[in-house]
Image (cartoon, rainbow, N blue to C red):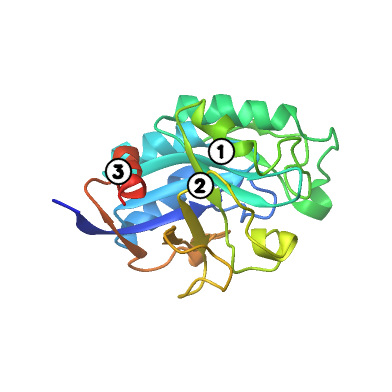
Amino acid sequence: MNDAAMLRTDLHIHSCLSPCGDGASTPQDLVGMAKLCGLDLIALTDHNTAQNCPAAAAAAKEYGIGFLPGVEVTTSEDIHMVCLFPSAGAAVDFGDLIRQSLSPVENRPEIFGVQQIVGPDGEPAGTEKILLINNASRYSLDELPTLCAGYGGLCYPAHVDREANGLLAVLGVWPEGLGVRAAEIRGETPPAGVPKGLKIIRASDAHSLADIPEGGFPLPLRSADFEGLRQWLEQK
């Protein structure tokens, strides 16, 4: 790709808003850790919400690191999908739509952990009451790419090499006609069943500051932003 550079990325990170995330992973601290680890571009992808993305975007601007606001959506089939957006506002609006489609089961902090919302100043700004994990949205795997695109975003299946909530583990096969350009993996090589021609994105799925990898995962992007990722995904 012309003018592309190998940028150090991690496009799947959770904050303290994800109940399975470490309470110390505030948006500000996870961005700071990514900077210390030498990353050029990161994405915040909490489960079924983007309420901590504005704070992370502000921190990324302060630290001088590329940032993609996102959501890790649980589809109606119980498959996890990474959805990334060009702005925090678009991500929040999309996340609100997803949240409204969840089952109205309240979080139990003593079991799942506190779902902490953090403001741009780094101070607690409330908690999310609806359980964000183990709670599928009403949107199907087939519907989600189009829904995400309506907010200007991009989406692709998360951790397809993992048993829990991975597309291949849930369905057994990759569905024909799925409107995505990439697949995410946690390991080094994609599993059998991932179609040829898809871009492969490695990511940590970090749930604590210690999980953010030194040096990240290289991607050949022209810029450390949404447009750089979009151009690479659309390249044939």
The image quarter containing residue 171 is bottom right
Which residue bears the numbered disc 3? 231
C-alpha separation, residue under disc 3 versus residue under disc 1? 17 Å
Which residue bears the numbered disc 1? 145
15 in relation to 143, above or below: below
Q: Which residue is at the front of the view, 88 or 218?
A: 218
Q: Is residue 205 left or right of residue 56?
A: right
Could you classify mark 3 by the number of other residues whose Cα lies within 10 Å: few (under 14), some (14-19), or many (20 or more)? Answer: some
Q: Residue 180 got which mark? A: 2
- Whichever of labels 3 and 2 marks the residue nearer the N terminus, that label is 2
Tell me the kind of residue under disc 3: Gln
Q: Residue 196 got which mark? A: none
C-alpha separation, residue under disc 3 versus residue under disc 2? 14 Å
C-alpha separation, residue under disc 1 versus residue under disc 2? 7 Å
Residue at 52% across / 68% down in the picture? 186
Q: Which residue is at the front of the view, 198 or 72?
A: 198
| Residue 228 placement (x, y as % from top left) | 28, 44
Q: Is mark 2 on a helix, strand or loop?
A: loop
Q: Is residue 61 left or right of residue 130?
A: left
- Whichever of labels 1 and 2 marks the residue nearer the N terminus, that label is 1
| Residue 191 placement (x, y as % from top left) | 56, 73
User: Cβ–Cβ below 8 Å for labels 1 and 2?
Assistant: yes
- Whichever of labels 3 and 1 marks the residue nearer the N terminus, that label is 1
Q: Is mark 3 on a helix, strand or loop?
A: helix
| Residue 200 placement (x, y as % from top left) | 43, 61
Q: Which residue is at the front of the view, 65 or 157?
A: 157
Residue at 55% across / 28% down in the picture? 92
For residue 51, say whether it is visible. no
The image quarter containing residue 36 is bottom left
